[in-house]
């Protein structure tokens, strides 16, 4: 049994050599087997200096460190669910070297002092923490926060996540103002009236379960609105955790006509479906598990109505999941972001309608992606680009495996799989319906900003 | 008692009728008939003697609760009524905590009524020894109502095989409609749903079910009609412009029933809003089975309790 060792950004820079590792760098379109030398936290060319740890890494993959655009660290206010320490350890365990903390905390991150405080606290964390600040004060959708001051404090985007910026006029103001700062409005696309009462995605499964349905139009209504606003104001709109196929076409169209629009999807909206609420436990792309709408075969009492499947936006239909996956493959979707949303058991072991929405994702994102790769729906390099270099570029971070770069990378074993179990998770919470399932790809080493933040015995011990 | 039903039943809980095979459904109905006869003859078995049954009604329902309570007591059970008002339930104790406490006091069977769809599934997964009997959850299921509806219709029609049953009203928010659909279709009937589009369209594509908005069209050739209770607060707002509009288009009257087969039966899960979903004149109509539905309530619940009690000895 390997002992997980977590490090921090405050540790001394790392020095080691991996021999015969498969190095994939989507930013340069390279995929070669070579030696990877890291000395004093910097990737070096040539032979490894003598006296440094040399590890045979044949069969392992090294790639740029993963970057999550959407993480709920639950700090301040809900440290029972997650803390900066536990959330960034979960990140490191999942291969992430950067997480973007979302502002729907209690109190919310709508104030520059609070943002500076959070960033200062994160200096010793196991992953780089960036902040998406609240777009409006108290996330109330009325008055803009001090975008300039928040940007100066380190905010890399603005969002009222948890909800959309509901009043169109306020969203328009935010986009127009943010254009002057070159930063995005990160929109949780959910029209509140249409989504009201929605507990899961509307459709045959919701009807069968007698759970309020959230129509796909709830997302499309905000996507269309914000694309119009972005086009008009010259602002940058970033749609986060897209969950329907309907929004993809207008995004493609708007982008082609010059609107600054980017978007991300979560691993769970690519792989899980609304059938999971009825107890199904098969990924969207697995054939032969297509419960007949309304037929009794689809409801498994062992898993049906599990509050752990309640998430916002809700799990998509199978067709939507496949369309989102195809949009990652063709580049329409810029990034895979986790929407890591930890909750303690008492907020999930309740009737479905009472369950807090959200599931954790930092530690399972790579595995879900690798499962999609194994099923032939994504190229490995496309997956890694969507998890690392492309999101990093959106927030102005460099990722490179070239000599001279700061070491910021993940090393994983694509041949091995692991079982998702509470004891195997670094997060304080275990709210994922993947518990009990096996996922491909075991992270062996994570290096953030030259520091070893996670080591599953690859460098440090046997 | 007869042994046939014992061999077909292997379930620990009754969460919905969707999981029951046709043979199991028939077995429950047969046992219901048998127990109804024994009850009339005052020859009920005490098959639940020594068994503690808990009634956990998180949503008020005098009819269903009394019916379960009578069924359990007459079969010899000790009944604990967890009345929600004044109990720890009102103090925010979680459903699981409450049911686990009930279980620790020796309750082996919990009759659960809850406003949240799926609550009985959570309960069933959370208890180690007790069986869960769903007495209605949210807008999802009401299995014993479906069983007594199926029994009532089976007796009126002789068989459900090939029967055409129309369900009128807010099926989307009706646990009775959902469970009726599963039971009736599995027993060989075809079901036509009629009502405002928002209330019936979500069921388009269900096996054995067709959706016909226009009531006159839906009724043609019907062997039986089930009128669902209209939640008045729901009528104006989510599905139909006004209650008046609903009454004029989907309220059942003797005149509209002319479109159905001669002698078509009329049912309603009760309590009915007379003058809304059914005209007052219809409650006393000879075609009405509403009284027989009520009469079948206790025997059907006895049948389910007995089957779960037999199965209980096996685990
Ligand atoms: Zn969100």
Image (spheres, coloured by chain):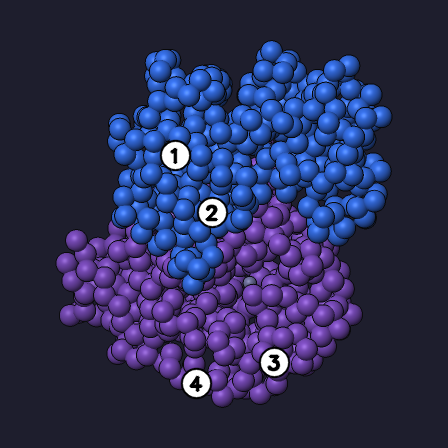
Chain colours: A purple, B blue
Residue for badge 3: A137
* Residue B57: numbered disc: 2
Q: Is residue A253 above or below residue A446?
A: above
Find the residue positioned furthest to the front: B42
Element marked by disc 1 = helix
In percent of width and height, residue A273 lies at 52, 44
Which residue does the image show at 54% across and 84% down from the upper left? Answer: A111
**Which residue is more in the foreground, A313 or A140?**
A140
Tell me the subunit letter for badge 1.
Answer: B
Tell me the subunit letter for badge 2.
Answer: B
Element marked by disc 3 = helix
* In this rendering, the label closer to the viewer, 2 or 4: 2
Residue for badge 1: B73
* In this rendering, the label closer to the viewer, 3 or 2: 2
In three-dimensional space, the C-alpha distance between marks 1 and 3, rounded to whole angstroms, equals 59 Å
* Residue A117: numbered disc: 4
Is the Cβ of the residue at disc 1 closer than 8 Å to that at disc 2?
Answer: no
* In this rendering, the label closer to the viewer, 3 or 4: 3
In three-dimensional space, the C-alpha distance between marks 1 and 4, rounded to whole angstroms, equals 64 Å
Quadrant of the displayed image that contains ligand 1: bottom right
In three-dimensional space, the C-alpha distance between marks 3 and 2, rounded to whole angstroms, equals 43 Å
In percent of width and height, residue B71 lies at 43, 31
Tell me the subunit letter for badge 4.
Answer: A
In three-dimensional space, the C-alpha distance between marks 3 and 4, rounded to whole angstroms, equals 18 Å
Element marked by disc 4 = helix
Tell me where residue A80 sits by quadrant: bottom left
Residue A233 makes an appearance in the image:
yes
In percent of width and height, residue A447 lies at 32, 67
Is the Cβ of the residue at disc 3 closer than 8 Å to that at disc 4?
Answer: no
């Amino acid at each position: 049994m390997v002992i997980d060792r977590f490090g921090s950004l405050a540790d001394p820079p790392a020095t080691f050599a991996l021999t015969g590792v498969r190095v994939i760098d989507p930013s340069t379109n390279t995929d070669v087997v070579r030696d990877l030398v890291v000395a004093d936290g910097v990737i070096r060319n040539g032979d490894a200096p003598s006296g440094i740890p040399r590890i045979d890494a044949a069969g392992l993959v090294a790639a740029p460190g993963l970057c999550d655009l959407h993480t709920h660290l639950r700090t301040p206010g809900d440290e029972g669910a997650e803390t900066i320490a536990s959330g960034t350890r979960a990140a490191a365990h999942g291969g992430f070297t950067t997480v973007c903390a979302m502002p729907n905390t209690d109190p919310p991150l709508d104030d520059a002092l609070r943002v500076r405080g959070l960033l200062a606290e994160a200096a010793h964390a196991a992953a780089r923490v960036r902040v998406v600040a609240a777009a409006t004060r108290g996330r109330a959708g009325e008055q803009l926060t001090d975008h300039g001051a928040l940007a100066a404090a380190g905010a890399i985007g603005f969002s009222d996540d948890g909800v959309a910026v509901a009043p169109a006029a306020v969203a328009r103001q935010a986009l127009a103002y943010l254009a002057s700062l070159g930063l995005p409005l990160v929109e949780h696309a959910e029209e509140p009236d249409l989504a009201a009462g929605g507990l899961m995605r509307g459709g045959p499964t919701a009807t069968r379960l007698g759970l309020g349905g959230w129509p796909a139009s709830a997302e499309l209504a905000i996507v269309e609105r914000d694309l119009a606003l972005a086009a008009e104001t010259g602002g940058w709109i970033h749609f986060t955790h897209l969950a329907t196929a309907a929004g993809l076409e207008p995004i493609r169209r708007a982008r082609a006509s010059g609107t600054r629009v980017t978007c991300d999807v979560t691993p769970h909206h690519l792989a899980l479906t609304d059938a999971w609420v009825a107890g199904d436990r098969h990924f969207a792309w697995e054939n032969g598990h297509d419960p007949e709408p309304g037929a009794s075969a689809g409801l498994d009492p062992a898993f049906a109505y599990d509050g752990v499947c309640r998430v916002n936006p809700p799990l998509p239909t199978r067709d939507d999941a496949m369309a989102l996956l195809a949009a990652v493959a063709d580049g329409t979707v810029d990034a895979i972001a986790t929407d890591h949303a930890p909750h303690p058991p008492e907020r999930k072991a309740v009737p479905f309608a009472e369950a807090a929405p959200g599931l954790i994702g930092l530690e399972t994102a790579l595995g879900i992606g690798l499962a999609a790769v194994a099923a032939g729906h994504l190229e490995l390099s496309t997956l890694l680009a969507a998890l690392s270099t492309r999101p990093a570029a959106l927030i102005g971070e460099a990722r490179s495996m070239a000599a001279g770069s700061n070491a910021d990378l993940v090393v994983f074993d694509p041949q091995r799989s692991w079982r998702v179990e509470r004891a195997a998770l670094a997060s304080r919470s275990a709210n994922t319906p993947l518990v009990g399932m096996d996922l491909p790809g075991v992270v062996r080493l994570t290096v953030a900003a030259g520091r070893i933040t996670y080591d599953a015995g690859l460098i440090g011990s046997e | 008692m007869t042994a046939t039903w014992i061999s077909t039943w292997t379930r620990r809980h009754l969460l919905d009728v969707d999981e029951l095979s046709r043979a199991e459904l028939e077995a429950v109905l047969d046992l219901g008939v048998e127990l109804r006869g024994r009850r009339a003859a005052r020859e009920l078995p005490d098959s639940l003697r020594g068994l503690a049954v808990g009634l956990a009604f998180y949503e008020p329902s005098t009819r269903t609760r009394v019916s379960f309570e009578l069924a359990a007591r007459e079969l010899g059970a000790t009944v604990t009524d967890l009345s929600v008002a004044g109990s720890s339930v009102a103090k925010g104790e979680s459903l699981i905590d409450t049911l686990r406490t009930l279980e620790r006091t020796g309750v082996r069977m919990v009759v659960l009524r809850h406003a949240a769809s799926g609550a009985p599934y959570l309960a069933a997964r959370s208890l180690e020894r007790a069986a869960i009997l769903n007495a209605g959850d949210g807008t999802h299921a009401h299995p014993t109502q479906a069983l007594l509806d199926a029994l009532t219709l089976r007796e009126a029609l002789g068989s459900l095989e090939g029967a055409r049953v129309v369900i009128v009203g807010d099926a989307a928010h009706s646990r009775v409609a959902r469970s009726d659909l599963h039971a009736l279709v599995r027993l060989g009937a075809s079901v036509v749903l009629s009502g405002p589009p928002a209330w019936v369209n979500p069921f388009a594509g269900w096996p054995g079910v067709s959706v016909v908005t226009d009531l006159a069209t839906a009724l043609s050739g019907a062997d039986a009609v089930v009128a669902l209770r209209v939640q008045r607060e729901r009528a104006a707002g989510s599905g139909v412009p006004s209650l008046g509009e609903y009454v004029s288009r989907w309220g059942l009257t003797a005149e509209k029933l002319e479109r159905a087969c001669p002698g078509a039966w009329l049912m309603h899960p009760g309590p009915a809003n007379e003058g809304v979903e059914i005209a007052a004149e219809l409650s006393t109509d000879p075609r009405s089975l509403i009284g027989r539905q009520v009469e079948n309530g206790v025997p059907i619940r006895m049948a389910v309790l007995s089957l779960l009690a037999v199965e209980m000895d096996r685990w």
